[in-house]
Image (cartoon, rainbow, N blue to C red):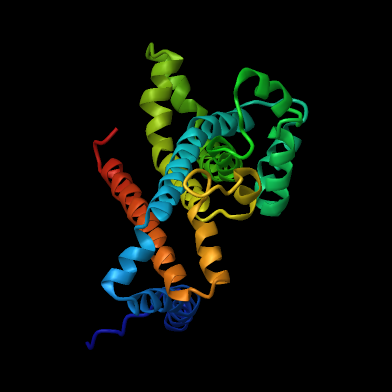
Amino acid sequence: MPARPHRNVLPGFGLSLGFTLAYLGVIVLIPLVALFARAAGLSWHDFLAAVWSPRVVASYELTFGASFLAALFNVPFGVMLAWVLVRYEFPGRKVVDALVDLPFALPTAVAGIALTAIYAKNGWFGQWLEPLGIKVAYTSLGVWVALTFIGLPFVVRTVQPVLEELEPELEEAAATLGATRGQAFRRIILPALRPAILTGFALAFARAVGEYGSVIFIAGNRPMHTEITPLLIVTKLEQYDYRGATALAAVMLLGSFGLLLLVQLVQRHYARPGRA
């Protein structure tokens, strides 16, 4: 008997795949190709002059460094917050859960103005920190505060669903076998959370690298000190230096993509059987 033609269980696969690829190409791939094509119009000397001047390098160090530290800081506190929201019932829990999403809904410019008002010399927190010699507004520390603020929800929202799916019976079984709570967390909970933690870190970092609105108000934007790379890109666009702006954007894109690729490789490493 002739073999029956293979039929997909879900109908419309070809149409769905075609629409997906077309949408991805128009929204993501074509703009990225245009970005690199515009940057490729520069000679090698002009490209280096645009992306490797001392002012630009200082902005790289601040942008990528503050973004990395903010995402790293958000990991333990984001996991802790997700743990409290999932494992404990307390008055106002739903309000706290809703406040986690506030950086998503709040316009970034509003967030920047609010943070500046709080941490300025005469602000709610700034008036107490200033006598201690801790200056937040208009410093690199202020940049870190803004990036931490906008990145926290990414860690919480990636870890929270995984915690909700974990069966409490696993911890109970570990306890009956003599494991302490710390051992149960390290041996059972943490391995299950590790992929979600890495994903949350990567999302928080990528979001922070491209942040603009909330940073420019609290940073002070002093060249070589508190100037971020996205601000330099906007400055070049205002000066009609489109090739220089696209060159900077290409460098930031490659740097972000490199770190995200590294995170994916680490995730695959820990996803292998026998890895803990």
- The structure residue drawn at horizontal position 46% and vertical position 23%, both measured from the top left corner, is 171
Q: Nearer the viewer, residue 169 or 131?
A: 131
Q: Quadrant of residue 50?
A: bottom left
In the image, residue 215 sits, relative to residue 156, either above or below, namely below
Q: Quadrant of the C terminus?
A: top left
Residue at 53 percent across and 75 percent down: it is 240
- The answer to which of 46 and 127 lies nearer the viewer is 46
**Viewer-proximal residue among 14 and 63:** 63
When the figure is inspected, residue 94 is found, relative to residue 178, above or below; the finding is below
Image point (30%, 44%), residue name: 266
Query: In the picture provided, is 121 more to the left or to the right than 38?
Result: right
114 lies left or right of 58: right
**Numbered disc total:** 0
Q: From the image, which quarter does the N terminus lie in?
A: bottom left
Residue 247: image location, x then y, percent: 39, 68
Give coordinates of residue 250: x percent, y percent. 39, 66
Eyeballing the image, is 248 above or below 30? above
Q: Nearer the viewer, residue 71 or 63?
A: 63
- Residue 272 location (% of width, % of height): 26, 44
Q: Residue 251 in the image: x percent, y percent?
A: 37, 61
